[in-house]
Image: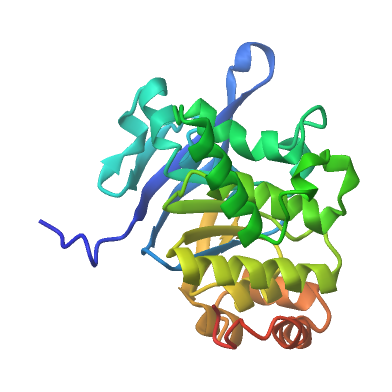
Amino acid sequence: MSNPATAPLLRVENLNKSYGKGVGSRHRVQILRDVSFELRRGQTLGLVGESGSGKSTTAACVMGLTGVDSGLIEFDGVNLTALSKPEMRRMRKRIQMVFQDPNGSLDPRFTVADLVEEPLIIHGVTDAAERARRVAQVLDRVGITVKQAQRFPFAFSGGQRQRIAIARALVLNPDLVVLDEPVSALDVSIQAQVLNLLSDLQDELGLTYLFIVHDLAVARLMSHNIAVMNAGRIVEAGTSADVFDNTSHPYTRALLDAVPGARRRAASLAAAAPALATEGK
């Protein structure tokens, strides 16, 4: 039996996923091909690749938002692919997601306080005072005051809305947070602020991050380990420093070459977000 202290929190093994195409979905398009990786508690795995590489589909499979053709997704010793829909809904209390565009998860008809409280109601926290306490606490952690929380999402900047989305994900005290391009829509100075916040929250709360990102500079800064995806496969994996500084696969080198000054950009982000270590988070 594996030791819970050393066993990975998330283990993905030989994951395959395809979608139907054409009339009657008779033709299958393979999106993921034997994807395997492990993610240990308190660490960040950066899943890197360009659009269409399969990284967001991998995230959707981990979240149970789409089914899989074959393979294993094991979270804290539980095979997620074997769970029923009600069982997976209950499991999502421990696995939350932050999307690239916070507007997709922030209903403009509700105040920020109501939006952050909603997951608590869905997952059966019936004590209104306890819900209010937890909402105030998590909003304070991301830099939003109780007074500000009475406003609607449109009253906030893009960076503030992403902080609200992070608060909404964290209010349930999850173990794993899937971050799907959480800073790609923000300018560099705001990116650094949000990345610093995510780093601080990870240290404070012991969070584990699956970080979906196309930007190798951001992945280098935030991740303990990096897995590079191309055409639905992981083509290179290792520590953040090894993948970034000792690239072995032509596709990873192409990603670096496609972004002029990627290494300088990583250094610039590190300078703007001083709490983040130079060897990855």
* Residue at the image position 36 percent from the left and 22 percent from the top: 84
Q: Is residue 191 above or below residue 266?
A: above
Closest to the observer, 27 or 103: 103
Residue 255 in the figure: left or right of residue 234: right
**Quarter occupied by residue 19:** top right
Image position, residue 244 (x, y; %): 60, 81
| Residue nearest the viewer, comparing 29 with 201 | 201
Seen in the picture, residue 70 relative to 146 is either above or below; the reply is: above
Q: Position of residue 13 (x, y in %)?
A: 35, 50
> What residue is rendered at 75% in x and 45% in y?
149
Viewed as shown, does residue 88 lie left or right of 163?
left
- Residue sitting farthest toward the front: 129
Residue 51 at least partly seen: no
Is residue 260 visible in the rendered structure shown here? yes
The quarter of the rendered structure image containing the C terminus is bottom right
* Rendered location of residue 181, percent (x, y): 69, 55
Q: Is residue 33 above or below residue 4?
A: above
Q: Is residue 89 left or right of residue 65?
A: left
